[in-house]
Image (spheres, rainbow, N blue to C red):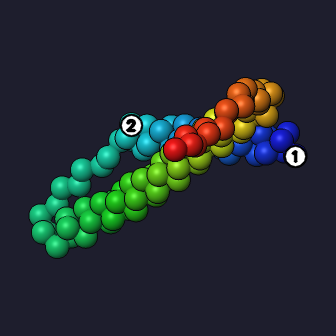
Amino acid sequence: MEDKAMMIAYVTLFIGIGLVAFTFITAYIFLIGNPDITASSDLVDVFGKALAPLIGGSIRIMYLGVMGWIGSILTARGVQLITQLKRLTRTEIRQPKTPVVKPIQPIRAKES
């Protein structure tokens, strides 16, 4: 049972790390792209051509933000699971010490 839990913890951790790495690689590829600057005499045409890439870019940025957020949550949960499972296995290995109990002498009442 512990092996399955530890395997799930490591899989969660590596999926989170992979998702964060993929997010950073995708963001880097997105940022090194060559944006096209359009020039035209018609103002409506310029806004139409300029807003389409901006909307597409904002959708990509939101997608990257959500991917990074989910990746960081998975990574944090994986680390949390691993540390808790290791802490549990360490406490199971240790033998609990039995406390030494000394007998208490009863107090006798004084006779008057």
Query: Of tags 2 and 1, which is closer to the observer?
Result: 1
Circle 1 is placed at which residue position?
1
Residue 103 visible here: yes
Res. 4 image quadrant: top right
Q: Residue furthest front?
A: 112
Cα gap from disc 2 to disc 1, whole angstroms: 47 Å
> Label 2 neighbourhood size at 10 Å, few (<14), some (14-19), many (20+)?
few
Where residue 45 appears, as percent x and y from the top left, is 21, 70
SS of the residue under disc 2:
loop
At 44% from the left and 42% from the top, the residue drawn is 27
Q: Residue 92: x and y, percent?
A: 79, 34
Up/down of 49 relative to 88, above or below: below
Instruction: Give the image location of residue 68, x and y in percent.
Output: 48, 48
State the residue in front, 36 or 104.
104
Residue type indicated by callout 1: Met
Instruction: Give above or below for 74 relative to 24.
Output: below
Residue drawn at (27%, 65%), measured in percent from left and top? 51
Return the residue nearer the eye: 110 or 87.
110
Q: Is residue 77 rendered to the left or right of residue 12? A: left
Give the residue at x 56% y 43%: 111
> Which of these two is toward me, 5 or 13?
5
Q: Say which amino acid is labelled 2.
A: Ile
Q: Is residue 18 visible?
A: no
Q: Residues within 10 Å of mark 1 (few under 14, many from 20)?
A: few
Q: Which residue is mark 2?
A: 32
Q: Is residue 99 above or below residue 57?
A: above
Task: For mark 1, give the secondary structure.
Answer: loop
Mark count: 2
**Which quarter of the figure has residue 90?**
top right
